[in-house]
Structure formats: structure tokens, C-alpha cells
Image (cartoon, rainbow, N blue to C red):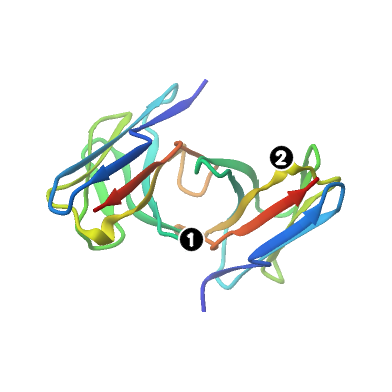
Amino acid sequence: SQTIHQWPATLVQPVGSPLSLECTVEGTSNPNLYWYRQAAGRGLQLLFYSVGIGQISSEVPQNLSASRPQDRQFILSSKKLLLSDSGFYLCAWSVRQGMSYTFGSGTRLTVV
Amino acid sequence: KNEVEQSPQNLTAQEGEFITINCSYSVGISALHWLQQHPGGGIVSLFMLSSGKKKHGRLIATINIQEKHSSLHITASHPRDSAVYICAVYGNKLVFGAGTILRVKS
């Protein structure tokens, strides 16, 4: 069966520090992978999506970047965190865009 | 105006009540999703609809493509249904509503 793992679950980081959040999918090949952010009281916002290894599309210009070094691995990074990067980050996958999405358990990031 | 509007924003119900959450959207879509987010943050996909109606247990989702409207119904609500319910529509990308916070009291 397909599963998605996302870690860590919570993270407190100082301003200016780097960030690396990892997401891995099991039980499927060549998934579409997504990073979303949910700010307090707001809907989910798509940050990045990937349709294949090394293929990253950015939806919102910001302080973050994403990489897909392997078929089922998606990494969200920042070189220097800002206070405004605080939020709830979710990884998700789907067989195709628009089709049923499976979400990870999320990472709550607090930048202090 | 947001592309996806949900109502109500907050809903408190007594156990056993019939609950309806509404979702209206303004763009052409090929699919609509209903998602459930529990207090811990994890999100579970409940339904994906492109037309008509789907039922799973006590949950029913309907969509009216012409009116650009969908509803999520919960029959015989229970405290464990307390969660945030999120509507999302797919046109050329997935766009999310802000969510409806549901609290079911025993």
C-alpha cells in the first residue's frame, strides 16, 4: 500500500538558520509530489510541485526551495529562515494532478 | 474574492445532529475534493467528486457543476467528527478553501 512519511513533526528554528524538511513516498512510482504551507487561519497554499526527478515548479516566489533527488523523495529547504516562514508545512502526492491526493502528517515550523 | 469560499467558517453542533458544510467556487474545475484535518494537523482525503453524489459511511458529498457549488453532509454527527473540513477544487491547479471548523459536542 502507498504511504507518505514526513518529518520532523515539529521544529523550532532561529531566524537565519537553515531548514531541511524531508518527505518520502512508498508503494508507488513516479508520483507527483507537492509542498504546501498553511498559515494560521488561512487555506493551504501550494509552494512547489514536481512531476519527476529534478523537475521542480515553484508557485510562489519566496525564501524557500525544493529538490527531488530521488523519485520518491521531496525536500523543502531554506538557506536562511525568516520569521514569516513559520507555519504548517504539508507534503502530498498524487498519481496525476487533480486526482486523489494523499497528505503527510505535516511539520509545524516556528521561527523564533 | 477567493476562488473557493466555504461556509460556515465555524460550526458547533450537538451529537446526533445533521451537519451541512458548503463550498462555492468561481473557476471551471475538473474535480472537487473534500478533506478533513484533525487537530494534530494531518489531512485525510474524504472525497473526490466531478459530478453527482458520493457516500461513505455517515458522510455524503454532492456537487452541482452548473451552480459551482458542493456540500458535505454528516449524518448522526459524533464528537469524533470534530475537525476542520476543507474544500479544494482542481482546474489547472488545486485551490483550497480556508476550511470550516466543526465542533460536535456530546
Residue A1, x across and y down, in percent? 52, 20
**Identity of the residue drawn at 51% across and 59% down:** B96
Residue A84 seen in this snapshot: yes
Residue A66, x across and y down, in percent? 23, 45
Count of numbered labels shown in the rendering: 2
The amino acid on which the numbered mark 1 sits, given as a three-letter code, is: Gly
Residue A44, x across and y down, in percent? 45, 56
State the image quarter where residue B58 is shown: top right
For numbered disc 2, what is the local secondary structure?
Answer: helix
Looking at the rendered structure, whether the residues under marks 1 and 2 are on a common chain is answered as no
Residue B31, x across and y down, in percent? 59, 54
**Identity of the residue drawn at 58% across and 73% down:** B26
Q: Which residue is mark 2?
A: B80
Looking at the image, is B26 positioned above or below residue B75?
A: below
Check the residue under mark 1 and report the chain it is in.
Answer: A
For numbered disc 1, what is the local secondary structure?
Answer: loop
Q: CA distance from mark 1 to mark 2?
A: 22 Å
Q: Looking at the picture, tell me which residue is in the foreground, B16 or A76.
A: B16
> Within 10 Å of the Cα at label 2, are there few (<14), some (14-19), or many (20+) other Cα atoms?
few
The amino acid on which the numbered mark 2 sits, given as a three-letter code, is: Arg
> Within 10 Å of the Cα at label 1, are there few (<14), some (14-19), or many (20+) other Cα atoms?
some
| Tag 1 and tag 2, C-beta contact below 8 Å | no
Q: Which residue is mark 1?
A: A43
Check the residue under mark 2 and report the chain it is in.
Answer: B
Looking at the image, is A33 positioned above or below residue A98?
A: above
Give the mark toward the camera: 1 or 2.
2
Q: Looking at the picture, tell me which residue is in the foreground, B27 or B14.
A: B14
**Identity of the residue drawn at 31% across and 55% down:** A86
On screen, residue A22 versus residue B36, left or right, reads: left
Residue B63 seen in this snapshot: no
